Amino acid sequence: MDNNERKQQYLRRLPGVDKLLEATGKPQAIPRQVLTASIRQVLDDIRKQILTEPGKVSSSDLSMENLAARALAAAHLILAPRLKRTINATGVVVHTNLGRSRLAESAIRKVIEASRYYSNLEFDLELGKRGSRYSIVENLLCEISGAEAALVVNNNAGAVLLCLETIARNREVIISRGELVEIGGSFRIPDVMAKSGALLKEVGTTNRTHLADYKNAINDSTGLLLKAHTSNYAVVGFTSSVPLSDLVKLGDTYGLPVMEDLGSGSFLDLSGYGLAKEPTVQESVASGAALVTFSGDKLLGGPQAGLIVGKKQMISKIKKNPLARALRIDKMTLAALEATLQLYRDPDAALEQIPTLAALTASLPHVEAKANQLAQALRQLAKEELEIELLDINSRAGGGSLPLLAIKSKGVGIRHSKISVNLLEKGLRQADPPVIGRIEDDWLIFDTRTIDSEEIELITAIVDKLTATNQV
Ligand SMILES: *Cc1c(COP(=O)(O)O)cnc(C)c1O
């Protein structure tokens, strides 16, 4: 049979859409539209293959059974959610690519309630008339931070933009050259400033900036003195920067407000847990800054949000800015934020119940116990090809907080005599649920600082499946 005859014969054997639809058994769970689209796609693909590379098509490829299975698989792929629960075995606690912070249980419950029912989101129950969503967490934020007023928006990038646009549009904003940072995901201080309409006035040098540099730059067009947390990088060695309180004094002399973008922003001093000292929100407020902005989902451990605390007069102005409406926080976020903030009234409760804080401050023996459990579970798979070892490793805070800090941790390293470490990494990443580890010294490492005890069984089952055939 020559190629042309083969093509004609194969094409004639292809079933029609209706026949193939019957052959799939038409499962209830797959919407009819999706199933027919998948069938058409499968038939198109095989038709193309027959025409271009008939030699690669086998007779069994054309069987009704195989074509139906392919169509069902294609439909399942279309229906699978793109956002998936993922196991973070990287040891990076606030991992921006993996969703930053997990919420505390109380916050999760409030999100469910806010989504399921109506709420008094913008309704004053006392007066029986329209209220403001801003009032939901304002008092709580003031209570915890010591500020006069507060406002929350969609994220910290939005908070910085909103503050600059309100206070410093068409005015010069003085900032140290060493603080003109880029945070992951394209947040760049100079770009945000340009978008806000404020005029960047950089002073000092990359490594050293002095009070006199700020002072000499002040003129009639100055609108704001800005300090930004350098977050994901550190200037070390011969360095000097101006403390916030000195900037505030300078600002007071000239009648200029001072704003600080804290980035991560923490309410708790974590230096007692082997972590470096980060400036707390309370300290920035106490220094007299007119505005302090920070993220809700970094060290704070809440939902994505941008928190602004500061002087009443400034915050009132910001609330009236139409841009605030465009950046407004939604009710589910607000519900999660209120519940998270409530935990900060009792620092012990915050450390225990907010997953980000619990993971950051977990003791080495605690992390090691989980590593032992995981190693043991993996050994019980009794796979000759699988090498398993407990390793001393370092976790990271992530989220632009404590960039230089290595947090002592324990992990489980695996390697396989028949499967390369890169293929192991890929297989785990594409598993259900995906497990994201890291490769170091030819080991695929699971850092148990960011793994829950309940996830150990899941990881073990995935490794088991992945290595079942000694090929991935
Ligand atoms: C992370 C960060 C931001 C951006 O915050 P988002 O909440 O991600 O929008 C802004 N400034 C600094 C200094 C940061 O570290």
Image (tube, rainbow, N blue to C red):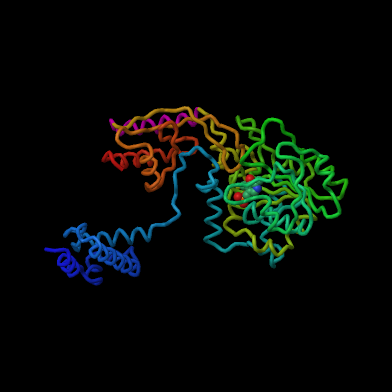
Magenta span: 365-384
In the rendered image, the vertical position of residue 381 relative to residue 8, given as above or below: above
Asked whether residue 193 is in view, the answer is yes
> Does residue 66 appear left or right of residue 423 in this picture?
left
> Does residue 340 appear left or right of residue 11 in this picture?
right
Q: Nearer the viewer, residue 110 or 275?
A: 275
Q: Nearer the viewer, residue 41 or 91?
A: 41
**Quarter in which the N terminus is drawn:** bottom left
In the rendered image, the vertical position of residue 345 relative to residue 199, given as above or below: above
Q: Nearer the viewer, residue 301 or 133?
A: 301
> Does residue 318 appear left or right of residue 107 in this picture?
right
Q: Residue at x 39, y 41 (%)?
A: 425
In the rendered image, the vertical position of residue 91 relative to residue 293, given as above or below: above
Q: Residue at x 54, y 37 (%)?
A: 359
Asked whether residue 125 is in view, the answer is no
**Number of marks drawn:** 0
**Residue 382 falls inside the magenta stretch:** yes
Q: Residue at x 78, y 53 (%)?
A: 172
Location of residue 207 (image quadrant):
top right
Where in the figure is residue 115, as x and y percent of width and height? 53, 60
